[in-house]
Amino acid sequence: MKIKVLVVDDSSFFRRRVSEIINADPEMEVIDTAKNGEEAITKAKSLRPDVITMDIEMPVLDGISAVKAIMKDTPTPILMFSSLTHQGAKSTIAALEAGAANFLPKKFEDIAKDKAEAVRLLQQNIKEISKRRSLLRTPRISPATAPVRSATVAADSRINTATLQRKNTDASRLHTANSVNVRHVAHVDNAAVEARTPVIASRVRKRASGKKYSLMAIGASTGGPVALQNVLTPLRSDFPLPILLIQHMPATFTAAFAARLNTLCQIKVKEAEHGDRLQPGVAYLAPGGKQVLIESKSGGFTLKVMESPAGINYKPSVDISFGSAAQSYHDKVLAIVLTGMGADGRDGAKLLKQKGSTIWAQDAQSCVVYGMPQAIVNAGLADDQVNLQQIAERINIEVGCR
């Protein structure tokens, strides 16, 4: 059965262009269009689409208001289109908080330099978020008893050895350029990589593992902005660790997102800057379009924010930042991989695991897209899977912050 899509935009040209791209995929079809938020609400109720694509700025009723109404009355996965401006960033974050599943730049050249790749990414985003429709419209299963949902990872869940070597060569070159020595991963543990027995999501444990940590690192992509808000807002201002956040997000969005989190959280949240000294109770959000590494300086650790080498798909990359954390903090990292498409974070988690650090993955039931966490689980790297609503409490117990 095809994925039914409702396209909402005040521009007839954009409605037609997006519809052509969707209909070009044999797995999807546009069942109707709407030119403003008010029409979108009406058609969402009558047509019951699997996915809605939504513009933010529209006459009669804007996209954010429409998202709120649709998620209240007819919960549906919604993909927002946004301009890559500061105001566009603030509006997009508001739309995600209202319930939208993900966003893409409205200009196709901002999605990807190659037109065919931009089309593929749009189609892929619609397919991935459509998997959440049944969960949005059915009663929630208790996280403690929910079965692990089998979902397709956007990329092959098995680690490709050649890709792994190339990515870690790139990461190594980054570190070497900054006097940080990172070993290449030349061998993949096939038994661990091929593991398919899931770690069952657990109830909140009342006792910590007893491990000592010096850093918490969190990676996320699709669905990450809201997930990060859920994880960070319960943390107290005296949280004992520095936190490194790697969220796939355009360069113009990360400053606004960090500022938004800072207003909501008790801890301090800021966009990471080159030379920042890592301090407890502060979360550093990797800036879009850059890579963030960790350096040891004068008895402490500072952040190295730099341009990304060619060939790295994600900017920022969870793999690169996790790999740097492994080299700097060894077994003292609590790393958490949240909702997102693809497998970014898996190779970096491999490095962290080799050093003895702890890896948690968000569970399938609470993910917008169970891609990145599933890649961690399938590679045998997850120490535990945790429901999103339990992660903050689990963190506080684990690091001794009660």
Image (spheres, rainbow, N blue to C red):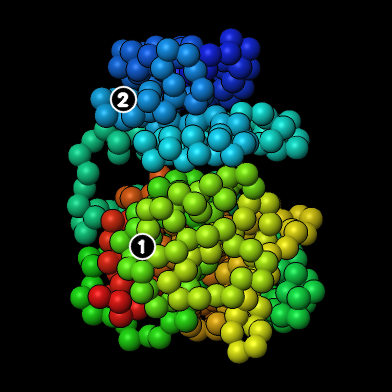
Report the disc number at residue 197. Answer: none
* Residue at point 62%, 55% (across, down): 287
Relative to 226, is 135 above or below?
above
Locate the N terminus and report the quarter of the image it occupies: top left
Identity of the residue drawn at 31% across and 25% down: 69
Up/down of 320 relative to 294, above or below: above
Whether residue 161 is situated above or below residue 50 in the rendered picture? below
Position of the C terminus, as image quadrant, is bottom left
Q: Name the secondary structure under disc 1.
A: loop
> Going by the image, does 206 lie left or right of 2?
left
Q: Secondary structure at mark 2?
A: helix
Query: Which residue sits at x=76%, y=55%?
Result: 311
- Foreground residue, 367 or 332? 332
Q: Measuring from the top left, give residue 129's x and y in whole percent.
A: 44, 37
| Position above or below: 322 against 357 | above
How many marks are shown on the rendered structure? 2
- Residue 135: percent from left, percent from top: 30, 39
Query: Residue 17: which quarter of the image?
Result: top right
Q: How far separated are the C-alphas under marks 2 and 1?
A: 30 Å
| Callout in the foreground (2, 1) | 1
Percent across and percent down for residue 140 are: 22, 44
Residue 391 in view in this figure: no
Based on the displayed image, in which of its 4 quarters is residue 13 positioned?
Answer: top right
**Residue type (three-letter) at the residue carrying disc 2:** Ala
Nearer to us in this view, 249 or 353: 249
- Circle 1 Cα neighbour tier, 10 Å, few/some/many (<14 / 14–19 / ≥20): some
Sequence-wise, the earlier of marks 2 and 1 is 2
Residue type indicated by callout 1: Gln
Q: Which residue is mark 2?
A: 69
Mark number displayed over residue 266 = 1
